[in-house]
Amino acid sequence: MRELPGNERGGQWRRRVALAAGVVVAWGLLTPGPAGAADYSRAADNFAGSQIAAHEGVHGGPGLARADTGQTLGHDVSGHQGVVDWKAATAAGAQFTYVKATEGTGFVNPQFRGQYDGAHAAGLIRGAYHFARPDVSTGAQQAQYFIAHGGDWRRDGTTLPGALDIEYNPYGDACYGKTPADLTNWIADFTRTYLAHEGRSALIYTSTTWWKLCTGNTNRFGNTDPLWLARYAPQIGELPAGWDKQSIWQFSRAGGLPGDQNYYNGPLSRVQALAKGPSPAA
């Protein structure tokens, strides 16, 4: 019988334990990925900004950011928030939300369906995001995995385009062992695949510091993919190359809403327009 590599033996052992116990493991749903895929047992620790906060810090306390006139308050959640009280979130001012759906090609947020559908039932405009793992598979493969597990866009006027969360590698080298050109091409592979499948451009979630370090501050996406910027400070600060404005600013790790606090750069009508998308004729 063929001797399995250590990482495959470990993965099979974890799956057998979970099946024998008859439970879904607390850290998420394992689904088939490429042979030799990375260990996803810590994937529940990874959410939008978890690594940015760890590497770049938080400048100022929660809620210090001040929105300009006409900005729209929202938030983002992951499995860490568990069952969210969406009625309370809307009462506290939330008007849109993003929910973590997937990571790499081997992890699905076990809370995703309840969170995503719960936000919709509460009247929020909601979207899904994918935590990128350029070290385990191609951008196209991860876009397809994301779409298949909740990241698809719906022409219902309440679903935002999917977002690609690309930030510091939680498992090793900050840039996933890739050159700036390689990472730029990986991001393009993901966004191109998402656009081809869904007819919408994915948002790109990142920080300016990571973008400079790991993509060489490429300006390739500024005209095609809306920017969701992470910076935990009273001011937005410098944007990555190619963008002259952000669509969403994740300004705080905590505040009056579950999860991270965000401002959409415009009134609610602009959030609604992003969800609605272009007319079929266009």
Image (spheres, rainbow, N blue to C red):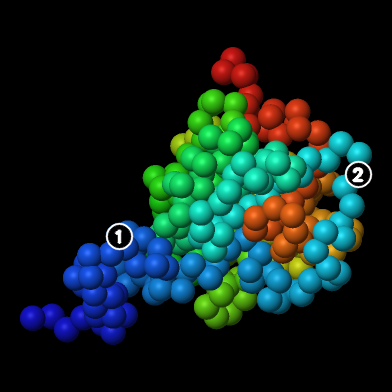
Q: Secondary structure at mark 1?
A: loop
Residue at the spot 56% in from the left edge and 41% down from the top edge: 119
Q: Which residue is mark 2?
A: 68
Neighbourhood count class around disc 1 (C-alpha, 10 Å): few under 14, some 14–19, many 20 upward = few
Count of marks, rendered view: 2
CA distance separating discs 1 and 2: 45 Å
Q: Which amino acid lies under the numbered mark 2 shown in the image of this protein?
A: Asp
Left or right, residue 73 beside residue 111: right
Residue at the spot 55% in from the left edge and 67% down from the top edge: 46
Q: Is residue 280 above or below residue 178?
A: above
Residue 115 visible: yes
Residue 161 location in percent, x, y?
Answer: 58, 39
Q: Is residue 60 above or below residue 280?
A: below
Residue 201 location in percent, x, y?
Answer: 60, 39
Residue 30 location in percent, x, y?
Answer: 34, 63
Q: Which of 197/230 is in front?
A: 230
Residue at the spot 65% in from the left edge and 45% down from the top edge: 88
Q: Is residue 191 above or below residue 3?
A: above
Residue at the spot 86% in from the left edge and 57% down from the top edge: 65
Neighbourhood count class around disc 2 (C-alpha, 10 Å): few under 14, some 14–19, many 20 upward = few
Q: Which amino acid lies under the numbered mark 1 shown in the image of this protein?
A: Pro
Q: Tell me if label 1 and label 2 are in contact, CB under 8 Å.
A: no
Left or right, residue 183 beside residue 257: left
Q: Which residue is mark 1?
A: 32
Residue 73 location in percent, x, y?
Answer: 76, 44
